[in-house]
Image (cartoon, helix red, strand yellow):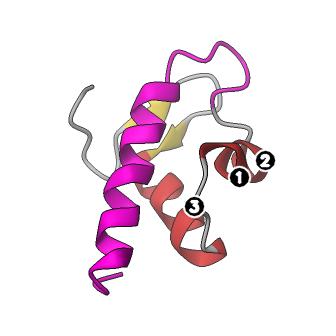
Amino acid sequence: MMEFENNDIVCRHLQLTKGEIIKVIREKHLSTFEEIQDETDAATVCGSCAADIEAILEEELKIRALGKE
C-alpha cells in the first residue's frame, strides 16, 4: 500500500483524494468498503485502488475506536 497525503488522489478514475474519502467515512459514519463504494463509486471502475481504500478505512476505524475522530 502507498502512503497518501490528504490531497493525493487515491482513485484515479474518479479523481478522489484521500481527504475526500476520509471526509465521507467520517461524515456518514461508514464502516465497510462496500459502504464507501456506495457513497463514492470508488474502486468501481478498475478496482486498482481497492486495497488503498481498505487501508484508509482500517486507519479511520482505528481512529474512531480511540475516540479521536
Is residue 57 rendered magenta in the image?
yes
Label 2: element kind = helix
Is residue 47 rendered magenta in the image?
yes
Label 1: element kind = helix
Is residue 65 shown above or below 4?
below
Judging by the rendered image, the residue that carries numbered circle 3 is 31
Q: Residue at x 31, y 87 (%)?
A: 67
Q: Residue at x 57, y 34 (%)?
A: 15
> Mark 2 to mark 1: distance in Å?
5 Å
Using residue 61 as the reference point, say whether residue 24 is left or right of it. right
Label 3: element kind = loop
Rendering coords of residue 61 (x, y %): 40, 64
Position of the C terminus by quadrant: bottom left
Q: Earlier in the sequence, mark 2 or mark 3?
A: 3
> Mark 2 to mark 3: distance in Å?
12 Å
Q: Amino acid at mark 1?
A: Glu
Whether tag 2 and tag 1 are in contact, CB under 8 A, the answer is: yes
Residue 3, by quadrant, is top left
Judging by the rendered image, the residue that carries numbered circle 2 is 38
Q: Amino acid at mark 3?
A: Ser
Residue 45, by quadrant, is top right
Is residue 69 shown above or below 15?
below
Q: Residue at x 65, y 36 (%)?
A: 42
Position of the N terminus by quadrant: top left
Q: Nearer the viewer, residue 34 or 12?
A: 34
Q: Which mark is residue 67?
A: none
Is residue 65 shown above or below 32?
below
Q: Amino acid at mark 2?
A: Asp
Is residue 5 shown above or below 28?
above
Judging by the rendered image, the residue that carries numbered circle 1 is 35
